[in-house]
Image (cartoon, rainbow, N blue to C red):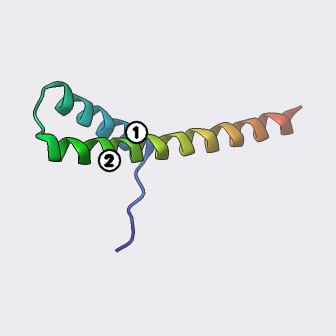
Amino acid sequence: MAKKKLSYKNAVEEIESIVDKIENGEPDVDELAELVKRAAGLIKECKVKLKGTEDSLSETLEELE
């Protein structure tokens, strides 16, 4: 099954949801481990998206000079 691409906004919203669950003490230990892994993956995806956007903007601005 193909992995669905998340938008940056949706990834951040999911990270916030995970943080809320953890802060409220909802997950058990097994679920906590999975939530932390998911959040780490989402953070990594967000960093890649931000870096790509930064590179693209820098390229565009350089073209204007």
The single residue placed furthest to the bottom in the displayed view is: 1
Q: Of tags 1 and 2, which is closer to the observer?
A: 2
- Secondary structure at badge 2 equals helix
Looking at the image, tell me whether mark 1 or mark 2 is earlier in sequence order. 1
Real-space Cα separation, disc 1 to disc 2, in angstroms: 16 Å
At a point 48% along the width and 47% down the height, the residue shown is 45
Q: Position of residue 47 (x, y in %)?
A: 53, 40
- Secondary structure at badge 1 equals helix
The single residue placed furthest to the front in the displayed view is: 29
Left or right position of 26 against 65? left
Q: Position of residue 59 (x, y in %)?
A: 78, 41
At a point 32% along the width and 37% down the height, the residue shown is 15
At a point 70% along the width and 37% down the height, the residue shown is 57
Question: Depth check: 34 or 44 in front?
Answer: 34
At a point 62% along the width and 40% down the height, the residue shown is 51
Label 2: few (<14), some (14–19) or many (≥20) C-alpha neighbours in 10 Å: some
Label 1: few (<14), some (14–19) or many (≥20) C-alpha neighbours in 10 Å: few
Tag 1 residue:
9
The quadrant of the image that shows the C terminus is top right
Q: Position of residue 2 (x, y in %)?
A: 39, 71
The single residue placed furthest to the top in the displayed view is: 23
Left or right position of 30 against 61? left
Looking at the rendered structure, the kind of residue marked 1 is Lys
Q: Position of residue 41 (x, y in %)?
A: 40, 47
The quadrant of the image that shows the N terminus is bottom left
Looking at the rendered structure, the kind of residue marked 2 is Arg
Q: Which mark is residue 38?
A: 2
Q: Which mark is residue 64?
A: none
Left or right position of 6 against 17? right
